């Protein structure tokens, strides 16, 4: 049986992580958060005191690093969406600070860094069923994915979600600052060199503004099962 890939793109705080994690659980897939790999890169740069703009130095760090992801075990049920391992160390929460988030956004603009990380992402998906989310999955990382989705929501709703996430982590950030950062992140993502955030022609656009997460998950699981069933019947 061939592997099945679900590729999800979309702007920051559209719900990609939560939706992907829940879909992965229901389908028994591995959830791959590609954004975590850019965050790991930013953490590597911080730990090794490497300038985020020094592309060759950043590339060298990434090539030498072992980046792994797995669905959380029972002992790791601390509201994380995925368990992230950097050179064997669990950095699932270390990469979730605003400092690392900002750094990840910066290293994501480096073309050679993106090439190396895309290769790592493709290696992860090569021999297993995955649901992978990020900014360039549908056309760069998994262009042959059987199900491509562009997950989005209104600017204000995405900013509200992000603000709530930060508050729940004890970070005292003003909503206005989060909203401004959301818009700035969108602008960076959509004007980013060879890999801008975009909606590919064969993507299913899902707007989560007015939907509960559970409804979105149900829609995606149902669609994936239909595609898998049709694929099986055609191959039999």
Image (cartoon, rainbow, N blue to C red):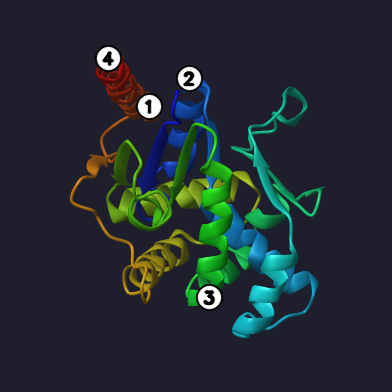
CA separation in Å, label 4 and label 2: 22 Å
**Where is residue 154 drawn, in percent x and y?**
27, 51
Question: Does residue 160 appear in this view?
Answer: yes
How many C-alpha atoms fall within 10 Å of the one at disc 4: few (<14), some, or many (≥20)? few
Report the residue marked by disc 1.
217
Residue indicated by mark 4: 233
Tell me the residue that label 2 is attached to: 26
Nearest the eye: 92 or 57: 57
Mark 2 or mark 1: name the one nearer the start of the chain: 2
Q: Residue at x 27, y 19 (%)?
A: 226
Residues under labels 4 and 1: Cα distance? 24 Å
Query: Distance between the Cα atoms at labels 2 and 1?
Result: 9 Å
**Which mark is nearer the camera, 4 or 1?**
4
Q: Residue at x 31, y 36 (%)?
A: 147
Return the x and y of residue 213 as percentages of the image width and height.
Answer: 38, 30
Task: Give the mark nearest the N terminus, 4 or 3.
Answer: 3
> Pointer 3: residues within 10 angstroms few (<14), some, or many (20+)?
some
Res. 173 visible in picture: no
SS at mark 1 in the image = helix
With 131 as the anchor, is 145 left or right in this view? left
Q: Nearer the viewer, mark 4 or mark 3?
A: 4
The front one of 52 and 68 is: 68
Which residue is identified by label 3?
112
Q: Residue furthest left?
A: 201
Q: Earlier in the sequence, mark 3 or mark 2?
A: 2
Q: Give the mark nearer the N terminus: 3 vs 1.
A: 3
């Amino acid at each position: 049986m061939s592997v099945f890939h679900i590729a999800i793109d979309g702007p920051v705080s559209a719900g990609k992580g939560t939706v992907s994690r829940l879909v992965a659980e229901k389908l028994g897939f591995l959830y791959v958060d590609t954004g975590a790999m850019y965050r790991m890169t930013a953490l590597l740069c911080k730990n090794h005191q490497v300038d985020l703009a020094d592309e060759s130095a950043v590339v060298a760090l990434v090539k030498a690093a072992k980046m792994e992801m797995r669905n959380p075990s029972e002992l790791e049920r601390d509201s994380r969406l995925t368990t992230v391992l950097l050179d064997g160390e669990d950095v699932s929460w270390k990469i979730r600070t605003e400092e690392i988030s900002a750094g990840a956004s910066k290293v994501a603009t480096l073309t050679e860094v993106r090439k190396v990380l895309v290769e790592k992402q493709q290696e992860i998906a090569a021999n297993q069923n995955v649901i992978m989310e990020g900014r360039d999955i549908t056309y760069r990382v998994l262009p042959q994915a059987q199900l491509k989705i562009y997950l989005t929501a209104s600017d204000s709703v995405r900013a509200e979600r992000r603000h709530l996430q930060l508050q729940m982590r004890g970070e005292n950030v003003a909503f206005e600052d989060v909203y401004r950062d959301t818009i700035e992140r969108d602008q960076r993502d959509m004007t980013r060199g060879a890999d801008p955030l975009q909606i590919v022609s064969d993507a299913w656009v899902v707007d989560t503004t007015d939907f509960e997460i559970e409804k979105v998950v149900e829609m995606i699981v149902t669609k994936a099962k239909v595609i898998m069933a049709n694929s099986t019947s055609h191959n039999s």
